[in-house]
Image (cartoon, rainbow, N blue to C red):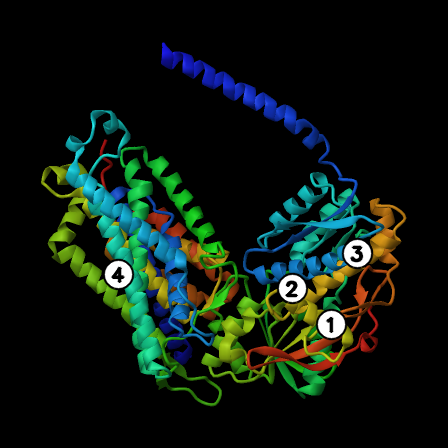
Amino acid sequence: MASLWSRVTRRSAVGIGLAALSVGLLPVIAGAGRPADKILVGHYASMTGKEATFGQSTDNGLRLAIDEINAAGGINGKKIEIITYDTKGESAEAGKAVTRLITQDKVVAVIGEVASGLSIAGGAVCQQYQVPMISPSSTNPRVTMGRDFVFRVCFIDPFQGFVVAKFARENLKAASAAILYDQSAPYSKGLRDEFKKNFEKMGGKVVADQAYNAGDQDFSAQLATIRSGSPDVIFVPGYYTEAGNIAIQARKLGITVPLLGGDGWDSEQLAKIGGDAIEGCYYSNHYAPDQPSDEVKAFVEKYKKAFNGQTPDGLAALGYDAGLILADALKRSKSLSGKDLRDAIAATQNFKAVTGTIGIDSNRNATKAAVVVQMKGGKPQFVAKVEPESQPAKK
Amino acid sequence: MLEKFLQTLMDGLAVGSLYALIALGYTMVYGILKFINFAHSDIFVLGAWLSYSMAIMAGLSMQSAVPVAPWIFAALGAVTVLAAVMQAWDRAGYDRVPAAWRGRLPTPGLGGTLTIVSLWGWSSVGLAFAARMIATGAAESSAWRTVAGGVILLAAMSTCGLIGFCVERTAYKPLRKAPRLNVLITAIGVSLLLQNLGQLDWMFGTRPQGMPRLLPDVTLAQFAGSETVPPVKLHLIDVVGAGTAVVLMVALDILVFRTKLGRAMRAVSYNDRNAALMGIPVDKVISFTFVLGAALAAAAGFLYAQKYPGLGQTASATWVLLGLKAFIAAVVGGIGNIRGAMLGGLLIGSAEMFARAYQSPSVADIYVFGILIVVLLFKPTGILGTNAQEKV
């Protein structure tokens, strides 16, 4: 009898407990919409996955910027709060993360992603719900194309491809080049197209044009073809994991010419994976930590202090700039509605940021200079700066 | 033309022997338990990452040596204490315990297993420390680096063998009598668990890392070549990689076909109930099979990391595709057949490398999967597989 009684009471106790819990939760659920004293900003980034350092660096930079804004009083007395969701570096996850940010967390603006393919996926959702999005570092032109709610604070691939081609032709005096690109990434394909076009226009010759797929580990077949063309430089517009592997295998095959890359190389893991093989190679980037500029110096100091002495990479700098530009637009915006905020971001001009003086053009892209760095002793070192004025007019 | 053919053949055999090593684990487990151990490719990934971690710990990379994570000692210590307690409990038995407690205490008999697990764990750690001592003592000598690498290979094989043992005991053994589908789903669960555990910061983290080179980059031989045609180069790493794989496969073949234990494995594979009636310790044989498969996968992981030093994080799609290809190798060779797995691995590896070199790297996988389809259409049991009558 005793056991039966205790079972009955235990069950009803659980029932009462659940009921009490749900009653207690009600106001919490109702109030979850939009806390009055906070401005919620969403961030979707590859915190894990193959490009994990991209997301982590960007998130660090963004949070550093927002912490500074909040410490200085926030936006008209309201603090900004960042909600970060992981995309694992997959487009499907990016779409889900942005939908969740907008429909469940009700953020006023979205920051992200680094990889262009993911920004295109996330941008589609932002455009649909009319919430402004700022991509810190997606350089493919299609990210902002035809989407009036999507902006970016970095330059675009046509410019980056031009910078690398010009650097190869003028600084390295390369007469011929080979290309090895990731045909599954829009970013890599876009850079390859622009590099090829500009390099040939400047009188250079592309002797080999080879492709691989993301996740490939063996590049010996492509590199053997490239070797038989004996190019002066090899352009590898992929991400750092593959770039490191490609460098090792190229050196193993006896290829000694420098490899060139884009901002997808920008990670401290590049030297860890590539080791000696990547020494002396060049890549174009948004900024260099040893660049002669006051903004850069101040930012590097702050970042090192906040994150255990880590040197910020370009993605951290762009995450920081994206945060500053969003905060600036939030201050100027008439209201927190998507349309007003969009107009405020679009009006950004001559904004002094870490990665250069940023102006948002009519295509919602940033116009600013690029730098070229060289890997020396496992660290990127500033070599040259290429200004946007010299960019050929777009057709 | 001959140079290109030779180079491609060498690359194909080098990669194929690694596929074969992984395929052996799939095929052995299928042969005995008739289920696909989907967590097997993750053991391979763990092998690669454990080799990396141990090499870093030994101070073999450019960075300074990293101390061993304290939780490893804590976990091993806990297992050791538990093992001692369970040993005592085994000795005491139910007799000395008040009757009221009996239902609440675990059944005796775990002491032996736990003791094995703890001793095994400590010896794996010991091997890793041996590698560290060799590496610090040898400083810059490349010969001693290679010796340290060999010890790391053994340590990784031992650790992964232990992981394989624990996975079998905790996840698969309780389901021995359950429908095969349940075990299959559990295997997928274990696979996801291992992938995601590996991503945690206190395990391997999410950042891709570069495996330190433990072998000197030496070209052993060079054939032909002219001004226009690059020569065929035989690298030390490919020879050592394929050589280690071949030695392990020959050892396995001898073990399975020439020893008493191997005969027991084949008997269990043929009919486990009859094998049990003949006095074969079925549980031990099954555990041993898992350990063997996991150790071979770990060796493949170590060799793979030496050949392709850029290691993606444990859940990376690269690993999934590699595991899939090894599984295809096992199916193509005839799943359940050990020599078939070796043949399948070499065949798949060569097909992939020839397609890469002679057509395009982007279509290589089409040939791999194409072979699978052709084999399944015309000889569904695989090239060396025999038609087994389904027992009803």
> Would residue B331 appear left or right of A206 to someone viewing this image?
left
Q: Position of residue A165 (x, y in %)?
A: 70, 78
Badges 4 and 3: C-beta atoms under 8 Å apart?
A: no
Chain letter of the residue carrying label 2: A
* Residue type pointed to by label 2: Ala
Depth check: A76 or B325 in front? Answer: A76
Local crowd at mark 2 within 10 Å, few (<14), some, or many (≥20)? few
Q: Which mark is residue A326?
A: 3
Q: Is residue A20 above or below residue A85?
A: above
* Residue that mark 2 sits on: A306
Chain letter of the residue carrying label 3: A
Secondary element type, mark 2: helix
* Residue that mark 4 sits on: B123
> Would residue B50 appear left or right of A111 to someone viewing this image?
left
Depth check: A335 or A3 in front? Answer: A3
* Residue type pointed to by label 4: Ser
Pair 2/4: label in front: 2
Q: CA distance from mark 1 to mark 2?
A: 13 Å
Depth check: B138 or B189 in front? Answer: B138
Local crowd at mark 1 within 10 Å, few (<14), some, or many (≥20)? few
